[in-house]
Amino acid sequence: MDHATTTYTWPSGAPEDTTLPLLPYAPQRMDVTFSCADAVSLGSGVLLSTTGSDGVQPAPRGLSVRVSDGRVTATLGQTRLATAPLTDTCRWQVVSGPSGTTVHVDGHEQGRTSERPAVNGLFTDITTTTGLAVEVTPDMRYASNPSVLKIAAGFIAIGALVGMLLALRRREPRRPRLLPHGWVRPRPLDGVVAGTLVVWAMIGAATVDDGYIVSMILSSADTGFVGNYMRWFNAPEAPFSWFYELYRPWVEISTTTLWLRLPSLVVCLVSWLLIDRVLVPRFAKGRITVARWAAGGVFLLWTVQFGIGLRPEPWVMLGSLATLALVERGIATRRLSLLACSVVTAGATTAVTPTGLAVFLQLLVAFPAAWPTVRAHGLRAIAVLLAAGASVLLLMFHDQSIDAVLHAVDVRTEIGPSYGITGEGQRYEWLFDPLQGGLNRRLPVLLLWFGMAVLAILVVLRRTPKVAAAPTRRLLITSVLYFAALALTPTKYTHHFGVLTGVATLLVAVVVHAIAHKALQRNWQLSLACAGLAVAVWVGIGAPLRWWFLGALNVKWSDVPPGVAGIDAADLALGAGLVLAVAGLAGAWRWLTPAWFVPVVAFGVVVVEVGTMTYAMVPRAATYTTGAANVAALGGDPCGIEEWLQVEPDVSAGMLPSSGFPTVNGFTTNGSFPRHGLLEPYGSTEAPVWHSNGRPGEVTTSWYRLPDGSDSPAAPPVVIPARGTGAVSATVEFADSAGKLLDSQSVLLTPEWTEARFDPRNATMVRLRMVDERPGDGWVAAGAPRLPKTVPSTELVPASEPVMLDWVGAFTMPCRRPPSVADGTVEPVRYRFASGPAIRDIGSVSYISSQGGPYAPLMQLATQKPVPTYLRGDKLSEPISVFRLDYPAPMRDLRMTRVHR
């Protein structure tokens, strides 16, 4: 491997403070030398500090060298490493490396620790120097490129693999056809599936990690490898990262939502063709109309939730289906070449993500059936299959050494989350939690469980008419092993269920086909299956539709379970199912078959999901939705939510003119009060603040006149900063030009300053009333109302300028780029674009040093000032928040040397 190493040398002239935010935070090596002449010239103060202390977060454990009372003292955090008196000729050296930090004075060791200091900058009080020199080498162990030898070996291995597969195919007497005749001929069901997926790609909610993954891919342009950018010190995703490499050239063309969704859309469409053209006919015999429609409905039920996005689950779905098709065809035709191809495909899928291990387990299930073919070819077959399996190493280690991969795994394990098998219950707790799981994640899994239970009974009783018995048994065992594979993964998120999409679609389709062909012959058996399906649907749809982040805006039933006329849809489904079950006992199954109930339920829920998402665009016609952003991108406006995002650069510009003087009783105007969190210029004459300081009283401000156009949907809201707790209240009143009261709204008071937003509708004046009822029971304060003067976010911060991005909202802002983490440092950007206050804590992992977040060094250095944001056409929401970052010093006075070895 060709490793890159960067060294920063400071100072390059007269010493000046500089930011140097390392990632990882501690350097691979740091050498500090200085003479007592520097210390004497300083007299007293900081000769060197590697951390700033004025930022949003506390300073980390850095190296500090101070001069005081004729002595020089070096500390690491709160630990004193060495102290010595000043002499005329003393010379100090501090060396930090993998084994720790050592201090030498005049060549003698004076102190040692096993820790290395954090470095987010280099700061000093001296203005001239005769001997101070610092060299910092960041930890860049992952910044490597394959050597010429490794590349050559890779090409030789690929050539040998292809040659082996071709040779096997030529030696086989009859070449089996993989795809049936007429497979390209479109069918009505294809139009339904493809049309739904295309519509969802256009308007559907993002998957949970789309912002996370797009940040990783964008960052790879700077580092040369795909790392876990948002945490874990940007450790590489290897050995599970090859499919991200496919996205690297893709994002260079565009990062708009629709463009980024095209690969997964193609993957889903190819997967559907495999299911419909190859696999359903393999498992189901005879007339398969019901099975095909069941497969289509269940497939959409899974892919609408799990399939269209940047997460790896769609790729695992495709890999699992391709592997299943190859291995089943290889077993049926006894072709070693197909079995070898299935091993290659399974290996490639395993290298997509840890949950891809489930696909490898498919091969273990199929091995007994494939054994006659293997035995017929003898040792040659063993060698072929081992060689095919070894091809996965090319994907796992193409851009990283084994040492780097093992280190990355250790980092992720140590920081976590890292659950063992015993923690698997957490996944199912989240699945059945209304907030974490939701209808759209819960129902697909429950339908799969229903299908597994029914199929297990049918297999045991050998009641599987018109179904290929052996492949069906293998499919059932495979579905069980998929859940076992999930238990082995270190994280327990419910979106991992997406790897089951292909297997779940086939299994449910097989069950439906068996029932349609009289696998259940007695009325009570059919009624029992109907009741079981009703219970599964009852549990499955008894939860809200939970779409990620902004995907739920104005979507019906996004916070409560769906219902009709005040009755939960889950209860209606259960009641209908039980009524049908009872009717079936009385002979209704002569005219009905419960086989059609599954596709009806699946397509019905898909219609609800897509329909509610489509309908949500109607009240939001003048503002942001995913669909509106995609339409805007097709029209040449590619910046996503920022096409509607407005910022308020000058709060004072929006202050409203007062028509008189307030009526104040017991309250204080301005004066002394807690100002932390209150925007400037509040607390001044032009923007007064009234506060009670715990004394009873009340205040009624004069009327403030609203400018023309304030009632426009595109205008910003009326904003009032307020805080309060206890027996207090605040009310905003709106009136027409004659002073007639039109509306009165309470201000939500919290212990901290918040900016309450109100829609004035057709009012022309606004005023504020506050009451503090009892002495000593609480405290209330509020500022004068304003109507913000806003500009587009891209006018304040050009779209070409990198900004700090929360992973939660990164996918919604395609024009933005995250800070570079090249050469072992994080780029000190000027602005932070965070997700709104309602969800901001979820994205905080990128700012936490204990999680290896890339933004922690910047937050330790910078002070931040809020820049209020507003969404044009949606007055009351704040989906994206903007903060300006100010650093104690720019990145300067550094000489950078890059070496490849």
Image: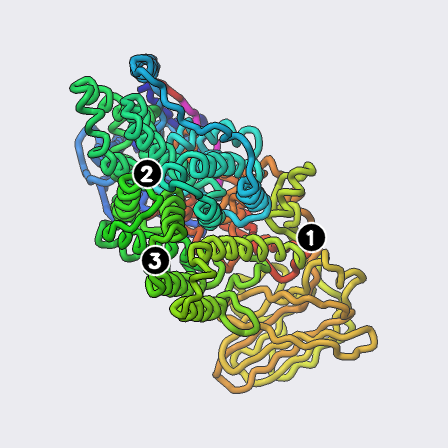
Q: Amino acid at mark 2?
A: Gly
Q: Which residue is mark 3?
A: 521
Mark in front: 2 vs 1: 2
Mark 3: which secondary structure?
loop
Q: Which residues are magenta?
A: 887-897
- Mark 1 and mark 3: Cα distance apart in space: 70 Å
Residue 52 coordinates in the image, percent (x, y)? 41, 45
Question: Foreground mark, 1 or 3?
Answer: 3
Q: In this figure, what is the number of numbered marks?
A: 3
Task: Identify which residue is drawn at 47% across, 29% down.
Answer: 248
Q: Residue farthest to the bottom?
A: 774
Of the numbered discs 3 and 2, the one sitting upstream in the chain is: 2
Q: Would residue 123 be visible to someone looking at this image?
A: no
Which callout, 1 or 3, points at the residue further toward the start of the chain? 3
Q: Quadrant of the N terminus?
A: top left
Furthest-right residue in view?
738
Report the disc number at residue 790: 1
Q: Which residue is at the front of the view, 348 or 319?
A: 319
- Asked whether the viewer can see residue 660, the reply is yes
The image quarter containing residue 758 is bottom right
Q: Nearer the viewer, mark 3 or mark 2?
A: 3
